[in-house]
Image: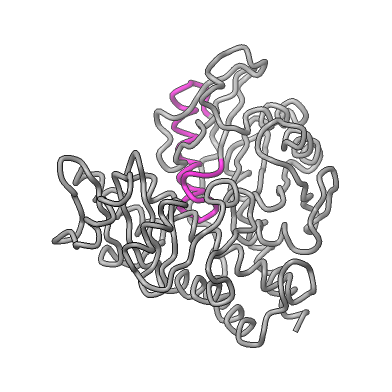
C-alpha cells in the first residue's frame, strides 16, 4: 500500500496537479490507514468511519490551477456544473464547501466522488483503489479550468448561459493566459512504423506517454489505436495512456471478437475512421483550449459542423447510439484527417506514424490558444 501511495503522489506532481508532495495527503485503507503524511489526522479517520471508502485524497492544486478554481467558485456557490462532456458524464457536478467541516464534507462525498473546500483544496475518494482519488482530482482540475475560460469568453460575447464577466474576472483571465502559453512539444515520436505486435504496443505506449507528458490529455481519458491490416490495436476503456502495457486490445475490424468488450468505448468510431480514411493510426486527446474553443458560440447541434480554421468541429456522444460520435466524427475526418468533437476533444488520424498525428494535435492546441486570446481581446 505504501508503494501505491508513493506512486500516486508522484503522479500528482508529475501531471502538474500539485506543486510538491507536501501539498497532498493521500490515505489508503488496508489493515490500517497508510499515508504519505507522518500521522493520520483525526478528521481523516472520521471520514473513513462515515464513508464507505478505502482511499481519500486531500490536496491543494498548484497555484495557477488553484487560482482558477478560486475565481470560478466565487461565482458558483454551492456547486459547479462542468460544461465539457467528459466531466459531465464522470463527475456530474462538484459541491463547493466553505470549510473542511467533517459532517459537511462527508455529506458532499456521499453525493459525489469529490468536492472543493475553499480553505483547503480538493477532497476526493475511492471505494476500490487509490487510483480513483487521483482520477477525480485530475477531472476536477480539468473541468474547472475548461469552465472558467469557456464561461468567460462566451459571457463576454453574449452567448448563453454564461453571464457577462466583470472587469476583475477579465483581468484574472488575461493574467492566467500570460502564464499558459503552450510550449512547443518536447516529446518527438519515431517515424518508424513497427510491424510486430510487441513493437506496435511499445509504439502505442510511447505515443500515449507523449500525449500525457505534453498535457494534451489527462492520463485516464482519451484513447489511441493502430490498424494493421484487418486488426485494430486499441487502448482499453479506462486505461491510463501513460501506463498502456497490458491494457491494449487487438480487435478484428469486423467486430468478430469478444475482446472489444474491454476496448475503448470509441472503438466503433475508430473502425469507421479507418474504413473511410484508409489511415493506420489515431490519437485522441483532450487539449484544454481545443475543447474550450469547440464550445465557443452557440451550442452546436448534432449533425451540424462548424470550423476552427480548417478543422471541423462536430457534436456527438461517446458510443454508437442514435447521437453517437460514430455518426458524425468519421465523416468529418474523411477528408481532413482531424476533427474536434465539441466539448470533448481532438481526434487526428494519419497514414503514417503517430508522430504526425501528435504534431497535428499539438499544432491545433497552440492555434486554439491564440484564437482564444484574440477572441477575448476582441470582446473588450
Between residue 320 and residue 356, name the one nearer to us. Answer: 320
Image position, residue 43 (x, y; %)? 24, 62
User: Is residue 371 left or right of 199 when viewed as pictured?
Assistant: right
Quarter of the picture containing the C terminus is: bottom right
User: Is residue 75 left or right of 246 when viewed as pictured?
Assistant: right
> At 44% across and 40% down in the image, what residue appears?
240
Between residue 226 and residue 305, name the one nearer to us. Answer: 305
Q: Is the residue 247 above or below the residue 36 in the image?
A: above
Between residue 4 and residue 330, name the one nearer to us. Answer: 4
Q: Is the residue 16 above or below the residue 210 in the image?
A: below
In the image, which residues are magenta? 194-222
* Magenta-span inclusion, residue 49: no
Instruction: Place residue 320 in its image quadrant.
Output: top right
> At 50% across and 24% down in the image, what residue appears?
249
Instruction: Place residue 319 in its image quadrant.
Output: top right
Image position, residue 181 (x, y; %)? 57, 70
Image position, residue 93 (x, y; %)? 55, 56
Instruction: Place residue 130 in its image quadrant.
Output: top left
Amino acid at each position: 500500500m505504501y508503494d501505491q501511495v508513493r506512486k500516486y503522489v508522484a503522479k500528482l506532481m508529475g501531471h502538474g496537479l500539485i506543486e510538491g508532495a507536501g501539498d497532498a495527503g493521500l490515505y489508503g485503507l488496508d489493515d490500517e490507514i497508510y499515508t504519505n503524511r507522518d500521522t493520520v489526522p483525526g478528521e481523516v479517520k472520521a471520514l473513513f468511519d462515515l464513508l464507505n471508502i478505502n482511499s481519500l485524497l486531500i490536496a491543494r492544486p498548484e497555484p495557477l490551477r488553484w487560482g482558477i478554481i478560486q475565481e470560478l467558485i466565487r461565482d458558483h456557490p454551492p456547486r459547479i456544473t462542468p460544461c465539457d462532456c467528459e466531466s459531465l458524464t464522470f463527475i456530474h457536478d462538484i459541491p463547493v464547501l466553505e470549510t473542511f467541516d467533517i459532517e459537511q464534507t462527508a455529506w458532499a462525498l456521499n453525493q459525489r466522488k469529490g468536492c472543493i473546500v475553499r480553505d483547503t483544496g480538493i477532497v476526493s475518494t475511492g471505494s476500490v483503489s487509490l487510483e480513483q482519488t487521483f482520477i477525480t482530482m485530475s477531472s476536477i482540475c480539468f473541468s474547472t479550468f475548461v469552465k472558467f475560460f469557456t464561461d468567460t469568453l462566451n459571457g463576454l460575447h453574449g452567448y448563453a448561459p454564461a453571464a457577462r464577466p466583470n472587469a476583475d474576472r477579465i483581468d484574472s483571465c488575461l493574467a492566467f493566459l500570460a502564464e499558459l502559453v503552450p510550449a512547443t512539444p518536447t516529446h518527438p515520436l519515431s517515424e518508424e512504423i513497427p510491424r510486430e505486435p510487441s513493437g506496435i504496443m511499445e509504439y502505442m505506449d510511447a505515443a500515449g506517454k507523449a500525449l500525457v507528458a505534453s498535457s494534451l490529455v489527462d492520463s485516464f481519458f482519451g484513447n489511441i489505436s493502430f490498424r494493421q491490416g484487418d486488426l485494430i490495436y486499441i487502448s482499453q476503456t479506462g486505461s491510463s495512456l501513460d501506463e498502456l502495457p497490458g491494457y491494449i486490445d487487438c480487435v478484428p475490424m469486423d467486430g468478430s471478437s469478444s475482446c472489444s468488450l474491454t476496448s475503448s468505448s470509441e472503438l466503433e468510431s475508430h473502425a469507421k475512421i479507418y474504413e473511410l480514411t484508409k489511415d493506420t493510426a489515431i490519437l485522441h486527446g483532450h487539449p484544454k483550449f481545443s475543447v474550450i474553443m469547440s464550445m465557443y458560440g452557440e451550442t452546436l447541434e448534432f449533425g451540424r459542423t462548424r470550423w476552427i480554421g480548417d478543422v471541423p468541429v462536430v457534436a456527438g456522444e461517446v458510443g454508437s447510439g442514435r447521437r453517437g460520435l460514430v455518426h458524425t466524427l468519421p465523416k468529418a475526418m474523411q477528408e481532413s484527417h482531424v476533427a474536434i468533437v465539441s466539448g470533448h476533444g481532438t481526434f487526428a488520424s494519419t497514414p503514417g506514424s503517430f508522430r504526425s498525428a501528435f504534431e497535428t494535435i499539438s499544432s491545433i492546441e497552440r492555434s486554439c490558444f491564440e484564437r482564444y486570446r484574440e477572441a477575448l481581446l476582441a470582446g473588450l
